[in-house]
Amino acid sequence: MSTHRPESRKVTTEGLRRMKKRGERIACLTAYDALMAGILDASGIDVLLVGDSAGTVVQGLDTTIQVTLDQMLYHCSMVTRAVKRALVVCDLPFMTFQVSAEEALRCAGRLFKEAGAEAVKLEGGKPFCGVVQRLTESGIPVMGHLGLTPQSIHHFGTYRVRGEDENEAQQILDDAKRLEDAGAFAIVLEKIPSDLARQVAESVEIPIIGIGAGVDVDGQILVTHDMLGLFTRFHPRFVRRYAEIAKEMGSAFEAYASDVRAGKFPSADESYD
Ligand code: KIV
């Protein structure tokens, strides 16, 4: 693997595949609004995922299950308005792709036409390969998501590491191959052992993007609000905090409140004659 400066040209699904071939790692983060998306894009992040993690880090929900298509349309349209270079991938929220391929196509189509999404992501393997194929054949690139799949939390009942036992590990390997065969352009692997993630990355030609899946994959993604130390309700082991923004914000808000109460804000310079 080589380190490299990101090219300035638009990131595409084909470009990501070339990056994997050249051994260039892919840097991905989440975005939910125009302000943050503009900063992320200008910083050279390759893929911006409008994640349904918006439910937890923006909306204050406990899970992603209640996030709706209308909310994703809103978040995604803000993000695409601000982005010039990164590929914008939007999550298909729970129950937009599970009922039928037709329903999935209608929902993904709305994310494309009304919000400017350039690809969608959906959680799950074998049961959804038909959906992946239908969307891909209709011109909608699909990113898969295996391992820990937060929309299925009530089925699994826990956020434990996935793929630790042999059966589950084999299923993840098989699902990755099936998703590739169905036309997926990339796959997110969440919270699985590093060795298994490496095997998956070696067994398919499409890029494997890890989150809690070790370093031997083709790229990494984190929830932006986690890596900024902005969302602090819990701190998974796989999150490296690159800043402590919540603390910074807290100090700024306290200083402001104290200045207001002491009559120190605004000053003469901050007022009009
Ligand atoms: O919703 C999300 O942000 C995600 C990432 C954690 C991969 O699916």
Image (spheres, rainbow, N blue to C red):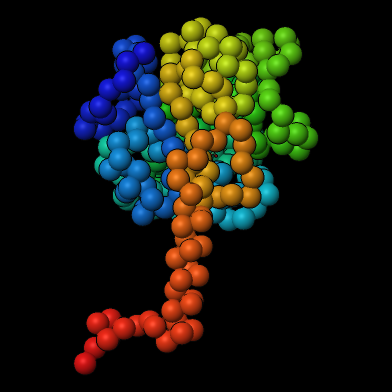
Query: Can see residue 119?
Result: no
Residue drawn at 38 percent across, 50 percent down = 36
Q: Nearer the viewer, residue 104 or 75?
A: 75
Q: Can residue 203 be seen in this snapshot? A: yes
95 lies above or below 136: below
**Residue 217 percent across, percent down from the top left:** 47, 17
Relative image position of residue 129 (x, y in whole percent)? 57, 21
View extreme (bottom): residue: 273
Image point 55% across, 50% down: which residue? 231
Question: Which residue is located at x 74 percent, y 13 percent?
Answer: 165
- Residue 154 percent across, percent down from the top left: 76, 38
Question: Where is ligand 1, by quadrant?
Answer: top right
In the drawing, does residue 256 fall left or right of residue 190?
A: left
Q: Quadrant for the N terminus, please.
A: top left
Can you tell which quarter of the image residue 141 is in?
Answer: top left
Q: Quadrant of residue 189?
A: top right
